[in-house]
Image (spheres, grey):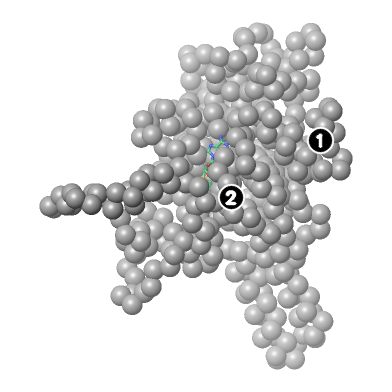
Amino acid sequence: MGKSSKDKRDAYYRLAKEQGWRARSAFKLIQIDEQFNLFDGVTRVVDLCAAPGSWSQVLSRILIKGESFGRRAWEEKQRRERRIAAEAAGVIQDEIHQDELEITLKPREGVKIVAVDLQPMSPLDGITTIKADITNPLTIPRILQALDPETYNSDTSDGGHPVDLVISDGAPDVTGLHDLDIYVQAQLLFAALNLALRVLKPGGKFVAKIFRAKDIDLIYAQLRCFFEIVHCAKPRSSRASSLEAFVVCEGFNMPKGYRLDPEKPLGLGANRPQRDEGESLKDKEGFVDRQRRTVKDDGVTILEFESDEEDENRWIAPFVACGDLSAFDSDATYHLPKDRVSLDPVQPPTAPPYKRALELRRQQGGLYGKTTKAPAK
Ligand code: SAM
């Protein structure tokens, strides 16, 4: 499919190139921030599965450069224009106008951003990039060391809990086998969560991509053991036709006595804790979670699941659509002017998994090889 047809089919793909974002995913993070005020008070962030880096670009532009985007930027622009008009009419003095201008550019102090991906990522100003697998427990000390090289203790692998926000846009290479893709995605989510539990400050936030598939409520319930608030967010820039959504978890609170064990990370696999008697968790409406939390004699907290018979007790995270209704619809096709020039991607992938296939194709003289003609339509 040619570039221009993708331009028409996907408004956010086009907009990303126009605005200098490395990927259209940037709009997903911006729209989640618009809804949840994600970056409020945030200075230390870990961006997991970050390549090619559009989420890191958003972090860099909001936290390091102090820019604003989306609805917030629009509101600030409106306010500024009103001020300028009032000033022109002699109502407001110069220093207030200056004050207003500062609202749009507010770099934060002490910002530290670490981006991690399996793929190499082109550098971004002020961001430390690590090429690593988030499912590997050894990645955690590398992140902690990158966050605070001076205070990190390599003997104990202790870097404290210095992070305000962990974001993860992790996605495996899709196989097309639906169940397998959903399973691998869930494993990435648990890897991201395990990592977040090791680095987040009390009260910290966690945002991660999910596929809203069968049994997603098990994941919501597990998240609610660690976070006071869990939402399922669907940004307008994420296609409505896709199962993709994002969990937005706020108010990190490690359950009392819960022991993190890198050898037995949290997940849906065989390491699922054993059933035991214990207190049930109730939400505000009085529904009992499918997951129970049990405190054993030695003070270790066990997390476990209820059986499928208790379906009426399943807890579903509130679903929140993010992004203005006036924003582009990611499922719509837009008509473009004929004289429109299609832009190149902002940052071509550095080492895409399909690189070898492209090289082979080039060596063989194109898609159908030197000697073979393209099949007739
Ligand atoms: N948020 C990114 C952005 O805005 O540019 C896009 C992320 S892309 C949808 C998904 C990324 O997940 C890919 O770059 C892939 O390499 C990465 N990924 C998949 N499995 C991973 C793993 N186990 N560890 C680290 N990164 C992983």
Write down the residue under mark 1: 159
Q: Is residue 37 visible?
A: no
* Secondary structure under the numbered disc 2 in the rendered image: loop
Q: Position of residue 340 (x, y in %)?
A: 36, 74
Q: Residue at x 58, y 63 (%)?
A: 70
Above/below status of 21 relative to 292: below
Disc 2/disc 1 C-alpha distance (Å):
24 Å
The reply, left or right, for residue 156 in relation to residue 138 is: right
Nearest to the observer: residue 155 or residue 45? 155
Write down the residue under mark 2: 121
Q: Residue at x 64, y 80 (%)?
A: 81
The reply, left or right, for residue 17 in relation to residue 136 is: left
Q: Quadrant of residue 255 in the image?
A: top right
Kind of residue at disc 1? Gly
Q: Position of residue 38 (x, y in %)?
A: 66, 50
Of tags 2 and 1, which is closer to the observer? 2
Residue 119 tag number: none
Q: Is residue 134 visible?
A: yes
Nearest to the observer: residue 229 or residue 216? 216
Q: Residue at x 52, y 59 (%)?
A: 347
* Secondary structure under the numbered disc 1 in the rendered image: loop
Q: Position of residue 282 (x, y in %)?
A: 64, 25
Classify the position of ligand 1 by quadrant: top left, top right, bottom left or bottom right.
Answer: top right
Q: Quadrant of residue 140 in the image?
A: top right
